[in-house]
Structures are given as C-alpha cells and as structure tokens.
Image: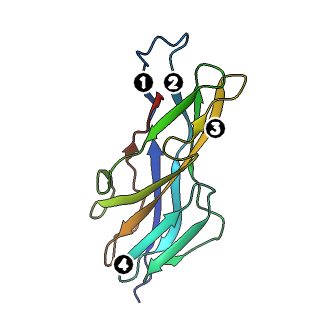
Amino acid sequence: MTQKWAAITACAALATLVASHGWAQEIAIQNTRGLSFGSFVAGNGGSVAVSPSGLRSAGGDVLLIRSGEGLAAEFTVTGDAQATYTIQLPGNDFVKLTGPGSDMVINDFTSAPSGAGGQLSAGGSQSLRVGGTLNVGFAQAPGDYAGTLSVIVNYN
C-alpha cells in the first residue's frame, strides 16, 4: 500500500428557509461547525464515514490516522417554540470536495434528529448534527479538500 496522507475537511454552509405558513417567527438554520473526515491514508481507495454523533469509520483500503478526528457538522435551528420541522439533506454525489487531487463525493448523509423528527425546544431552538460518507479514490492525492453542503429546514 502506498503511504499517502490526505487530510479531508468539508465545510458546511449556512442555509435559511422562511416558512410561509403564518408562523410567528421564521425558521432559520445556522452552521456552527463543519463536517470533517479527518486524516487518513487513501491506499487503494474506499470510504470514510462520520456519523451524526461524530464516530468515524473506514471502508475498503482506507486507513484512519489519529483516532477521534471525525466531526459531524453542527447547526442550530431556531424558530417558534415547540414547533416541529423537516430536514432536507443533500442527495448522493451532490456534494463534491475539491483539492490537490481528483474530486471526492459525499453520500449517505444522515442527521440527528432526522427527517421530520425535528422539534424546537420551549426556547425555540435545537441542535442538528449531520454526518456522511466520503468516497475516496484509488491513490487519492494527499492534501486538504473542501466543499460546501446545504441543509434545508422547514416547519411541518
């Protein structure tokens, strides 16, 4: 296996969606931390997954370097107290990371809470965490890679 380091970081973007259902307050989402896949050796390719809780795992011929480097993206959702909302994550192959080598794509986005499971607190906010799976190419060039993902929320 060729020893190549690739520090991969995906930065999450701010997304805001205004509800038009007569709610007293707009629902908004603000990014507080980007999704990070950490450092790894690409080898013959494979994947690096980060769960919404921040657990990182590798598939294929990818070797993780330094445990604990994976970070789920974090957002703060704000709006009407106790309101429920839906979460729309990017589709597969939609988010690309660019850097010194071939582009890599992120698939299988997951969130906590997920889908229609969001509910704002009595204070009108909730933390939302997003993970995903990075597809790493054969002998992926080492270096820093970055991209942007959008998460959309809307009142139920």
Which residue: 43% across, 39% down?
151
Q: Residue 38 carries which label?
A: none
Q: Is residue 44 above or below residue 129?
A: below
Q: How crowded is mark 3: few (under 14 residues within 10 Å), some or many (20 or more)?
A: some
Q: Closer to the camera: disc 4 or disc 1?
A: 1
Circle 1: element type: loop
Q: Residue 17 carries which label?
A: 1
Q: How far is mark 3 from mark 4, CA to CA?
A: 33 Å
Q: Which mark is residue 127?
A: 3
In the picture of the structure, the residue carrying the numbered disc 2 is: 28
Three-letter amino acid code of the residue under disc 1: Leu
Pointer 3 or 4: first along the chain: 4
Q: How far is mark 3 from mark 1, CA to CA?
A: 16 Å
Q: How many labels does the image show?
A: 4
Label 4 with label 2: CB-CB less than 8 Å? no
Q: Identify which residue, 20 or 100, lies in the foreground.
A: 20
Residue furthest to the right in view is: 122
Three-letter amino acid code of the residue under disc 2: Ala
Q: Closer to the camera: disc 3 or disc 4?
A: 3
- Judge whether residue 128 can be spotted in this image: yes
Q: Which mark is residue 45?
A: 4
Residue 9 location (% of width, % of height): 47, 54
Residue 99 location (% of width, % of height): 33, 56
Label 2 with label 1: CB-CB less than 8 Å? yes
Which of the 4 image quadrants contains residue 64?
Answer: bottom right
Pointer 3 or 1: first along the chain: 1
Pointer 2 or 1: first along the chain: 1
Circle 4: element type: loop
Q: Identify which residue, 40 or 124, lies in the foreground.
A: 124
Pointer 4 or 1: first along the chain: 1
Q: How far is mark 4 from mark 2, CA to CA?
A: 38 Å
Pointer 3 or 2: first along the chain: 2
